[in-house]
Amino acid sequence: MVPADQRAPASPPKRQVAPWNDERVRSLAFQSLTLALVVGLLAYLALNAADNLSRQGIATGFGFLGREASFAITTALIPYSPADTYARALLVGLLNTLLVAGLGLVLATLLGLALGLARLSANWLLGRLALVYVEIMRNTPLVLQLFLWWDLLRLSTPPPREAWKPLPGVYISLRGVFFPVPVYDPLYLWMGAALALGVAAAALLGVWGRRRQARTGRALRLGLPGLALILLPPAIVFFAGGAPHLLDVPHPTRFDFSGGRSITPEFAALLAGLVAYTAAFIGEILRGSILSVRSGQSEAAAALGLTRGQALRLIVLPQAIRVAIPPLTSEYLNLAKNSSLAVAIGFPELFSVTNTVANQTGQAIEAMAIVCATYLAISLSISLLMNLYNRSMAPVER
Amino acid sequence: MHIMKFLGVAVAGLAFGLSAALAGTTLDGVRSRGVVTCAVNTGLAGFAMPDHEGNYQGLDADTCRAIAAAVFGDARKAKFVPATAQQRFTLLQTGEVDVLVRNTTWTLLRDTENGFNFAPVTYYDGQGFLVAKKLDVKGARDLDGATVCVQPGTTTELNLADYFRSNHMSFKPLVIEKLDEVENAFFSGRCDAYTTDRSGLAATRAAKAPDPEDYVILPEIISKEPLAPAVRHGDDEWFDIVKWTVFAMIGAEEKGITSANVDDMAKSDDPEVKRMLGTSPGMGKALHLDDRWAYAVIKQVGNYGEVFERNVGARSPLKLARGLNALWTQGGLMYAMPFR
């Protein structure tokens, strides 16, 4: 023992304890024991499976990814034919998943915000309607809703030969919506660049406006000039470039239509189902988080002379959004994962394509491992982005 | 490649590790459980479909009953596990079922990499197309640009793509897992054509079409689909039992033995019939079964012809002709190996 008077006065006396009573040693021991158990169990399972698989002569590994897929996929964002590899087929599925999840996130958030505000509205009827909607959507299984949407879309639309034509070149039938798209022209690239310039200019204008308001206290109405800055440059480029207007228009064929682009009933049903379902949850989250902002905040905003819209936009929502982000993240994750239910109605997203791959190759385990890893990656990316956003929205403390 | 392989195996461990006690022979397992467990279709008329009492009926279901009769002398000791096209292979690989009799096509990769052995073919099928008559399609060559309904995880999906590719035609597949849903989609007009094995098309048309007369099966057969029962690699004893159960049904038809006359035939002087029905012992012992195994199969389930007619032939709603499934002596492909 070191004599007490030789120690630094601030450090407390260190008690000697037996290792099994030392908190740090004990927690370290328990943690390594747990880790060893988990690793051991996994290793046991893997070896057991390897043994079983090899005893039965079943192929393992990911070598199949390079083989020709030999099956077709209807909706593909990138060129794909049955002569491509399994890996590319899976990529097509992944892009379809990302498309439906990405669109779904945006639309569900917008619809959810509208629902949340409707529930808070002073209008009795609007509030009740929103309540009924939310309760129905939240309390029925999503997969049933998907079937309902799908049946609805197919049964309420005519067969292709009697398709509706709301606009020239647009056909709506139970085969989906076929619509014209512009034929690619190099000018579109320049239009894109002009649009980017316009957006940058509008952003600068906004910064200038805010600084000026901070200096002079006078708010400028910059909405219209900002919009003009964004829209005018691409328009000028378009007309200066000779206004290319070649359209790829769908035309009727023996069975349905070809040319243009189309939205299949399966995609529409999946998107509608995911959005309608998730929006109900998002609406409740936003409603709750708006209610969590104390009423004193709105009253203070009103006392300062802000309109109700300004108070909502500048005072209430920024505070509410901080409360809403963690539960919103979890809803976004659900939406992304729920897109895999498309397998039931035949939209070729990742899980649906994987099902086919798993069966054609017989390597279900590897295929499912790929899907699990991919959904994990998608979910973690959403989480990461939402956490970054959360941090940027955190209150600035001075 | 090694790391990838290990990764695959490691993941495999999670799925396989806890299930499937694959120790011991399949026959021992079957005997100790008291039933033969078969994976069958979730509902395909003529092959495996529950009747109004919930009992599976069909060619595949009867094959399973025949195996139960061979093993236990009692055709009722068959247990049916309904399986989708995707589930079926995993069910057999993991040992959840003893036999896969789910209108499954015998292919090279399934016979090797997937770890299965195929018993003799119980139905020689081929893939075709079902279309509405009002579309006025005369043959599969007219289907360029059509939307085609198909189930995933089947050789059908590949044959479909191959057929259109080799004929330089395009098509839009609609891939749906559940048979009911794929049939709904077709009959609601979402697809122009529905493709699967022609026996399956006949079943769908007979059982599900609003009016069967409005639909026609196109003449083209675009693939060979030999449907056969499958067992796991590595258990020859069980493989032999399943194989010879099928041969017993075919052999019985060759010899004119039916469920009605099997008792009389047991007194026959034909030495092969005597060996088959166990009047002269030896065959059963070789298979590790009772000598009366084939007698039980024929008495309780019937010969191949009886099973065919009852489930898919003239005496069924499907009304399929024997065609390739006639005996070899009548221009078909059904041929039993000698009982010797």
Image: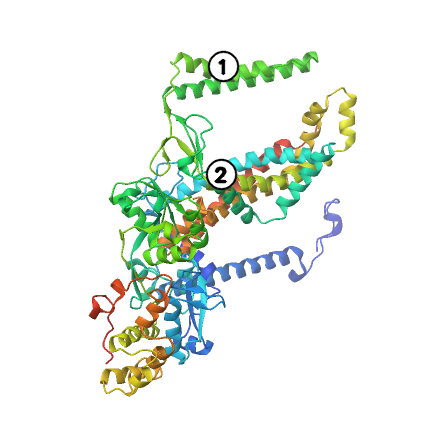
Marked residue chain, label 1 = A
Give the secondary structure at mark 1: helix
Quadrant hosting residue A30: bottom right
Percent of width and height locating residue B193: 36, 47
Quadrant hosting residue A225: top right
Tell me the mark number nearer the camera, choosing from 1 and 2.
2
Looking at numbered disc 2 in the image, what kind of residue is underneath it?
Ala
Residues at discs 1 and 2 both on one chain:
yes
In terms of sequence position, does the residue under pointer 1 or pointer 2 come before the other? Answer: 1
Asked if the residue at tag 2 contacts the one at tag 1, i.e. Cβ–Cβ closer than 8 Å, the answer is no
- The residue that mark 2 highlights is A268
Above or below, A279 against B198 in this view is: above
Residue A232, label in figure:
1
Percent of width and height locating residue B28: 41, 77
Percent of width and height locating residue A10: 74, 44
Give the secondary structure at mark 2: helix
Q: Is residue B234 visible?
A: no
Within 10 Å of disc 2 (Cα), the crowding (few <14, some 14-19, many 20+) is some
Q: Is residue A175 visible?
A: yes
The C terminus of chain A appears in which quarter of the rendering? top right
Above or below, A117 against A82 in this view is: above
The N terminus of chain A appears in which quarter of the rendering? bottom right
